[in-house]
Image: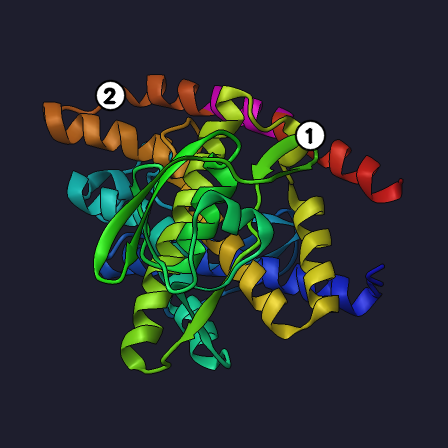
Amino acid sequence: MIRINILHILLAILIFGVLILIHEGGHYFMARRFRVTINEFAIGMGPKLVSKKSKKTGITYSLRALPVGGFVAMEGEDEESEDENAFTRKPVWQRILITAAGALTNITVGIVVMVIIIAFQQAIPSNTVGELGPASEQIGLKVGDTFVSVDGTRVHTSTETYYEIMRKGIKPIDIQVMRNGETVTLSGVTFPTFEEEGTVFGDIDFKVYADEKNVGTVLREGFFRSWSTIKMIWESIIDLITGRYSIQSISGPVGVTKALGEAAARGGFDFIYLAVVISMNLGVMNLLPLPALDGGRLLFQFIELIFRKPVPRKAEGYVHFAGLALLLALMAVIVVKDVVQLIR
């Protein structure tokens, strides 16, 4: 059993804060790039713990009590303003870039750190079978087979192959491999399965060879592993909506802090890798076109870009207010669920 001490928890909270800082920093630097008037840059929500106002820029930088978010308060973002550098007075394309910058920064930083993690790994896994278990032999795999596709989805790395088998291997699927220079199709193969938190996944019992480690293979593995991670996050959202995953699978700040604490207790690479996944998750989730999220604001901005006329500010405000209320209610349910699981 993994033992988590107070240092692991503090480290988890620190990393969670860093991920928020990266996100809000994306908004901040893009807003500064377009000379938008910024009133406050805050990490955390709720009452201020410390704050300092810059004499040069007039921006207040603050740290707030609740480490569950942050914000960049831009002049005119949520109210009317006569300031010529107010957010709403900027061209819509600039506002789109400012709004998207937080999520895109999270994703970009995640990709860069993913490549760094892979560069420090002792070996890079290939997509070629090196060792077979009984189930893999039974379905017709052979040592030396290189995976090409799993159930119609092209795979480039073992990470993609494992993910596709885990997600789709709960039923008979088709697999394509490259064998002795020729493409071979294994039709209707059945993988073993396992169950976790009420969800069934396809299982694997084969291992792959290590690939030659050089700049090309590191960048290639980093790109496709990052893409696989982003795809996993997106498809997890779809699976949640369609009912494959239950609300028990969702974690809020408490659950994320617990997971980061456990990863910190296991060791550095596990901890950093999980932080990368959470950073990408934060980016993808914020781009969803839901009220109160960056994606919801982007939706209204794209409507303005297409029709050359903004949606009435009051109407947009009501939509975001309703979305925020629902989001806070959902977060409250998830936090209660996380706390209950934590004290069991």
Crowding around mark 1 (Cα neighbors within 10 Å: few <14, some 14 to 19, many 20+) is few
Label 1 residue SS? loop
Residue, disc 2: 311
User: Is residue 57 something one can see in this rendering?
Assistant: no
For the C terminus, the quadrant is: top right
Image point 51% across, 51% down: which residue?
Answer: 137
Image point 30% across, 37% down: which residue?
Answer: 152
Magenta stretch: dominant secondary structure: helix
| 331 and 5: which is toward the camera | 5
User: Is 15 colored magenta in this rendering?
Assistant: no
Left or right: residue 308 compared with residue 318: left
Image point 33% across, 33% down: which residue?
Answer: 297
In this rendering, which labeled residue sits more in front, label 2 or label 1? 1
Left or right: residue 313 compared with residue 334: left
Q: Which mark is residue 44?
A: none
Label 2 residue SS? loop
User: Is residue 175 something one can see in this rendering?
Assistant: yes
- Amino acid at dot 1: Gly
Q: Which residues are magenta?
A: 321-329
Above or below, 54 against 76 in this view is below
Above or below, 128 against 107 in this view is below
| Place of residue 287 in the rendered image (x, y in percent of width and height, measured from the top left) | 37, 39
